[in-house]
Image (cartoon, coloured by chain):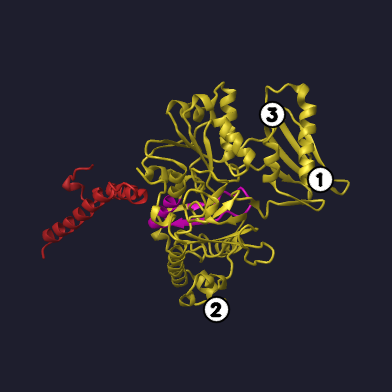
Chain colours: A red, B yellow
């Protein structure tokens, strides 16, 4: 596996985490999940800022 | 946002499930402490407690108590951080030290990133439970130094999504102006400083209850809002609900919190702590409704494993049904009732500063006060200096003095010497108040 493929696979995983956090950040009745997910979303966005993901 | 609980899963967890969670976390904590902290490995070995022998919550009682002296000794003998930490300094992202306001050697504390997130999470239980929401504007009025103070509250407010405004390096007058101009809805500071800000505002001709948008005041650092007369004073001055959120540097996070029901008790976040109440003299466990010393085991902070820490705080634990909010966490009725080492004995009578404060604060005419214990002809005496509000008619002073003395005397069956002093004479405090001076071992000290 060359370096580029490793990087891409890593980015795919981060994007999966990002999408999952995005979903959790909309949870209605569990503030600890909603707001911690929003905070984590901000952190995960930084991991792949070169992908310029939409930051909702 | 529907839930009134920050963590509806754990805050309403049935007790058997909660205790199972506590046991799982306790086992993790003891294992981590034993593996990584030389102090704890030695202490557990000496007491014959192997980590895998912790099989029930009752087994915690086999672990000896931890004292502040032991923490200090560990750091004095092996500076800077002692042998109690379970991490290397390189793994820490945060440093704090205790304020030193109690006259003790300051304790140095490290936190990992996970611990630091936990500190703010513990604050979230209280702030969200008391009513702070993402639409709020939260103003933290304190110095933002190495004392952990309200750092956790700051990050909790951010986590809740509120606009969070720090105010280090400002004068009280500047803070009052910003509270008004920035539309602050939640104030966070010690109760002593909230009283001070209200006094400064009055000097500036500002009525905070009418002119500010503050609807909640959040306090920690000293008993205040759990003293009924002080709570009433705060709530009247600010036109807001005043909440009590005790904690300590050793634990990092809040150790108890007041919810929006304001039932007269503080909830214990039992998913994050195991809290016991013991007789301070014998060390024997006490049950519900019995006043004793709070012993804390923090299940959240790993860098500084805190297991069965004798806090010196006095509490009275009651069952969760004391509050109608639906939380299954037990509570402390009346909050932190005082400190075992703050209690003074005068001519055989126990005197708690918080009890005196509760009586003195009933008198709205009083701006500030000070308690001095001294010897006169070898007999212990108590003087209470009171500073009246600037606009109080001096003709009322004799009656005020007599009334205060009468209330104090009746409550304690002890004679108090009450003295009215000039405006601006007594010290003011930005953080924790130190209103009691014990001069009995200083026979030549002046009482002025």
Give the image location of residue B135, x and y in percent.
37, 36
* In magenta segment, residue B70: no
Q: Is residue A2 above or below residue B128?
A: below
Dot 3 corresponds to which residue? B365
Which element is circle 1 on?
A: loop
B235 relative position to B124: left or right: right
B368 to the left or right of A53:
right
Query: Is residue B112 highlighted in magenta?
Result: yes
Chain letter for the residue marked with disc 2 in the picture: B
Q: Nearer the viewer, residue B173 or B205?
A: B205
User: Mark 3 vs mark 2: same chain?
Assistant: yes
Mark 3 and mark 2: Cα distance apart in space:
59 Å
Are both tags, 1 and 2, on one chain?
yes
Q: Label 1, on which residue?
A: B414
The x, y position of residue A21, in whole percent, is 26, 51
In the rendered image, residue B224, in percent from the top left (x then y), is placed at 60, 42
Q: Along the line of sight, which residue is nearer the eye, A32 or B148?
A: A32
Residue ID for mark 2: B48
> Which span is picked out in magenta?
B96-122
- Label 3's element? loop
Mark 1 surroundings: few (<14), some (14-19) or many (≥20) residues within 10 A:
some
Q: Earlier in the sequence, mark 1 or mark 2?
A: 2
Residue drawn at point x = 43 percent, y = 28 percent: B183
Question: Is A6 drawn above or below residue B405 in the view shown?
Answer: below
Q: Residue at x 68, y 66 (%)?
A: B282
- The quarter of the displayed image where residue B131 is located: top left
Q: Nearer the viewer, mark 3 or mark 2?
A: 3
Lower position in the chain sequence, tag 3 or tag 2: 2
Picture quarter with the C terminus of chain B: top right
The chain under label 1 reads B
């Amino acid at each position: 596996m060359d370096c580029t493929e490793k990087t891409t696979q890593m980015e795919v995983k981060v994007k999966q985490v990002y999408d999952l956090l995005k979903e959790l950040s909309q949870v209605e009745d569990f503030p600890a999940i909603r707001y911690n997910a929003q905070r984590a979303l901000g952190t995960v966005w930084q991991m792949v800022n070169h992908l310029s993901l939409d930051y909702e | 946002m529907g839930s009134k609980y920050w963590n509806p899963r754990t805050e309403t967890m049935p007790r058997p499930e909660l205790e199972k969670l506590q046991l799982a976390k306790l086992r993790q904590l003891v294992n981590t402490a034993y593996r990584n902290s030389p102090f704890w490995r030695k202490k557990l070995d000496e007491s014959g407690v192997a980590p895998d022998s912790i099989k029930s919550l009752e087994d915690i009682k086999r672990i000896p108590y931890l004292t502040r002296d032991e923490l200090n000794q560990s750091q004095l003998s092996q500076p800077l951080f002692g042998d109690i930490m379970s991490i290397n300094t390189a793994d820490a992202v945060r440093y704090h030290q205790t304020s030193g306001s109690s006259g003790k050697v300051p304790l140095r504390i490290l936190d990992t990133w996970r611990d630091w997130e936990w500190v703010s999470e513990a604050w979230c239980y209280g702030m969200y439970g008391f009513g702070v929401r993402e639409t709020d504007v939260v103003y933290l009025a304190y110095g933002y130094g190495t004392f952990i103070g309200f750092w956790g509250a700051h990050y909790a407010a951010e986590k809740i999504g509120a606009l969070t405004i720090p105010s280090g390096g400002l004068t009280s007058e500047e803070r009052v102006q910003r509270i008004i101009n920035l539309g602050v809805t939640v104030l966070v500071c010690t109760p002593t400083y909230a009283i001070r800000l209200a006094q400064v505002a009055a000097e500036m001709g500002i009525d905070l209850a009418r002119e500010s948008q503050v609807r909640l005041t959040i306090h920690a650092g000293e008993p205040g809002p759990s003293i009924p007369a002080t709570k009433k004073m705060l709530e009247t001055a600010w036109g807001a609900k005043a909440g009590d959120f005790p904690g300590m540097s050793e634990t990092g996070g809040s150790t108890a919190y007041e919810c929006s029901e304001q039932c007269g008790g503080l909830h214990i976040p039992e998913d994050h702590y195991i809290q016991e109440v013991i007789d301070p003299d014998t060390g024997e466990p006490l049950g519900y409704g019995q006043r004793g010393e709070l012993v804390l085991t923090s299940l959240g902070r790993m860098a500084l494993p805190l297991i069965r820490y004798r806090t010196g705080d006095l509490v009275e634990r009651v069952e969760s049904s004391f509050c109608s909010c639906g939380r299954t966490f037990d509570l402390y009725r009346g909050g932190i009732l005082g400190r075992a080492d703050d209690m003074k004995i005068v001519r055989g009578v126990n005197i708690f500063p918080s009890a005196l404060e509760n009586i003195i604060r009933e008198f709205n005419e009083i701006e500030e006060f000070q308690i001095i214990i001294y010897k006169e002809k070898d007999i212990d005496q108590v003087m209470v200096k009171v500073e009246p509000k600037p606009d109080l008619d001096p003709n009322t002073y004799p009656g005020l003095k007599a009334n205060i003395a009468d209330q104090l005397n009746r409550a304690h069956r002890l004679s108090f010497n009450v003295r009215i002093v000039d405006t601006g004479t007594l010290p003011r405090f930005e953080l924790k108040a130190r209103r009691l001076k014990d001069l009995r071992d200083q026979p030549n000290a002046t009482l002025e």
